[in-house]
Image (tube, rainbow, N blue to C red):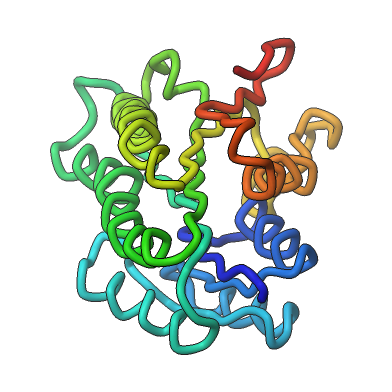
Amino acid sequence: MADTAVIAGVGPGLGASLARTFVAEGCQVGLFARSTDFLEELSSDLGDDAVAVPTDITDPAQVEAGFDAVRDAFGPVDVLVNHASGGAWSGLRDISPEAFESAWRTSAYGALLCSQEAVDDMLAGDGGTIVFTGATSAVRGRGGAIGFSAAKFAVRGMAESMARELGPEGIHVAHVVIDGQIETPSVRESRPDRDEDEFLDPDAIADSYWHLVEQDRSAWTLELDLRPHVEAF
């Protein structure tokens, strides 16, 4: 039986690569994002093994409905990727409380809601995998991005706590640290002179996520560090 995966926060770039990689590996995938048009286009490209579920992951009712839609289409959820990220690219003196809260709600609160929905399915089945998308800002605060950094630190703490809580129950929780920029249409538009080899390859990163899903549980990974010249642990 194919695994059922939910990718929360799907857009051009890594989110789309994750969806394509998981489907290619035999998963049936629920695609969560607020952008309806992109989700529908990607789901159409992926065929019957993907379902577009427009969802605001900061809304508990929408998250519950989204997971119900995935279960109706494919069955209980085995894999969750908490990929949604909130940006608040301002320093302490410039950021508004609302922008700070928005970054946290998208990255951490949304991941909490999605994880709570997915875990019961995994506990009732044969375990599962939850992967969080992190960033260097989860390890080292970034100047001028206090909202983003605080949100990513929160996500890392959640992953570490959940890994210790859920690991003995057969649920593998991992946090992936990504350092660099992935080329998307909006990034290319804003940085037209940047060399392509300076961007990260989303397909290669998606392969690393898939390795976390399929690896034997005895080879436990809590944090996968994809920063250049830094070994994973």
- Quarter of the picture holding the N terminus: bottom right
| In the displayed structure image, the side of residue 74 where residue 25 appears, left or right | right
Left or right of 74, for residue 170: left
Please provide percent x and percent y for residue 183: 71, 45
Q: Can residue 148 be spotted in the picture?
A: no
What residue is rendered at 67% in x and 69% in y? 27
Q: In the image, is residue 107 above or below residue 229?
A: below
Residue 121 can be seen, yes or no = yes
| Figure check: 6 above or below 220 | below
Residue 154, given in percent of the width and then of the height, sits at 30, 31
Query: Disc count in the image?
Result: 0
Taking 72 as reference, is 120 left or right? left
Give the image quarter of residue 92. top left
Q: Nearer the viewer, residue 13 or 163?
A: 163
As drawn, which residue projects farthest toward the left? 97
Q: Is residue 140 left or right of residue 197?
A: left
Q: Quadrant of residue 49?
A: bottom right
64 above or below 151?
below
Give the x, y percent position of residue 121.
39, 67
**Residue 61: image location, x then y, percent:** 21, 74
Instruction: Say which residue appears at 34% left-offset and 26% top-offset.
Output: 153
| Residue drawn at point x = 59 percent, y = 39 percent | 217
Which quadrant would the C terminus be assigned to in this image? top right
Q: In percent of the image, x 57 and y 60: which residue is there?
A: 11
